[in-house]
Image (cartoon, rainbow, N blue to C red):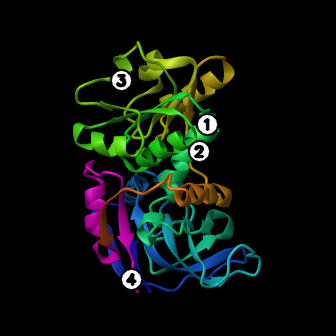
Amino acid sequence: MKAAVIYQYGSPEVLRYEEVELPKIQPNEVLVKVRASCVNPVDWKIRKGMLKFITGNKFPMILGFDLSGDVVEVGSQVKLFKPGDAIYGNVGLKGGAYAEFTVVPETSAALKPTKMTYEEAASVPVAGLTALQSLRDLGNIQARQTVLINGASGGVGTYAVQIAKALGAEVTGVCSAKNVDLVKSLGADRVIDYTQQDFTQEIATQYDIILDAVAKQSFSSCQKVLKPHGTYVTTLPSFESVVQNVLTAIFPGQKARNVLAIPRTQDLNYLKELSEAGKLKTVIDRTYPLQEIVAAHTYSESDRVVGKIAIAIRL
């Protein structure tokens, strides 16, 4: 089978499209013919070696976490799926979704949303689960609460706006001027153009939850616009944020949290239900074939992406 492989950390050019062996499944896994994957920022951060304290130096390495495709074979312990099922999910920290075939743990996949294409569905897991678990699990979002999404036009942000609205919140999105209409179309009640306004200085308005989906603001910078018992969630851990997590967990008042999305079938099923109800859609900026993964990574690093970058895989 064909896959995008790296043999060292570095620039997008270290990605090589070549023939590799078909993976073998464990009893709790399914073998999937991959129809689509996507590029998340974590993919190129791994490729550059920024997360080598987690990934180590074991090469060759096939990147990619999100996928949608068709089940080819199921392990002896698998009960949720059968060959021929169209599914979507996350392969876990080992990666491997930039390939024509890959293996997925049963507990990290679900049946594909029927209203989504393979490319749209493959774009959901990491970003959609990050948005859901940030708002519901860490933020304890409630109906009629006020929520601000910083980076509302990005991969996590576009899902977060829709999920927050589906959960009954009043949503403010922060993005650039060119994406204001898009964010409004996703359901945002109010949109702030960050080139004209700094939401952290609008102290007359306070929020129950601030999700910094692009990790551009700190907990400290957001405290003035966070309600006394509000929650700030960031998608990028740092030494400062970890310390704040610990301190705010001990003392009453405002909370700081880091999100690390956990792939779970029940959460993927929930996102599927939102899609089927017309409350969740994927915004795709560009779609690349797997053979053009170098170009896809280059574009992802440009900081101009609106929504998601999909990877189409055709056998």
Q: Which quadrant is the C terminus positioned in?
A: bottom left
Q: Is residue 117 left or right of residue 265?
A: left
**C-alpha separation, residue under disc 3 versus residue under disc 4:** 44 Å
Question: Residue 94, image x and y in percent?
Answer: 55, 65
- Identify which amino acid the numbered label 2 is placed on: Gln
Q: Amino acid at mark 1?
A: Leu
Which quadrant of the figure contains the N terminus?
Answer: bottom left
In this rendering, does residue 182 appear at all?
yes
Up-down relation of residue 232 to residue 279 (above or below) = above
Task: Check disc 1 and report the residue beneath it.
Answer: 138
Q: Secondary structure at mark 3?
A: helix
**Residue at mark 3:** 199
Q: Secondary structure at mark 1?
A: helix
Please give the range of residues in magenta: 289-315
How many marks overall? 4
| Mark 2 to mark 1 CA distance (whole Å) | 6 Å
How far from the left and from the top, in percent, is residue 38?
A: 41, 64
Q: CA distance from mark 1 to mark 4?
A: 38 Å
Residues packed near mark 3 inside 10 Å, few (<14), some (14 to 19) or many (20 plus): many
Name the outermost residue toward the top. Answer: 204
Q: Secondary structure at mark 4?
A: loop
In the rendered image, which residue does mark 4 sit on? 314
Work out whether mark 3 precedes mark 1 in sequence or the reverse, and give the earlier one. Answer: 1
| 200 vs 241, nearest the viewer | 200
Say which label, 4 or 2, has the lower sequence index. Answer: 2
Q: Which residue is mark 2?
A: 133
Q: Are marks 2 and 1 in contact (CB under 8 Å)?
A: yes
The answer to if 117 sits in the magenta stretch is no
| Crowd around label 1: few <14 · some 14–19 · many ≥20 (10 Å) | some
182 left or right of 189 in image? left
Q: What type is the residue that disc 3 sits on?
A: Phe
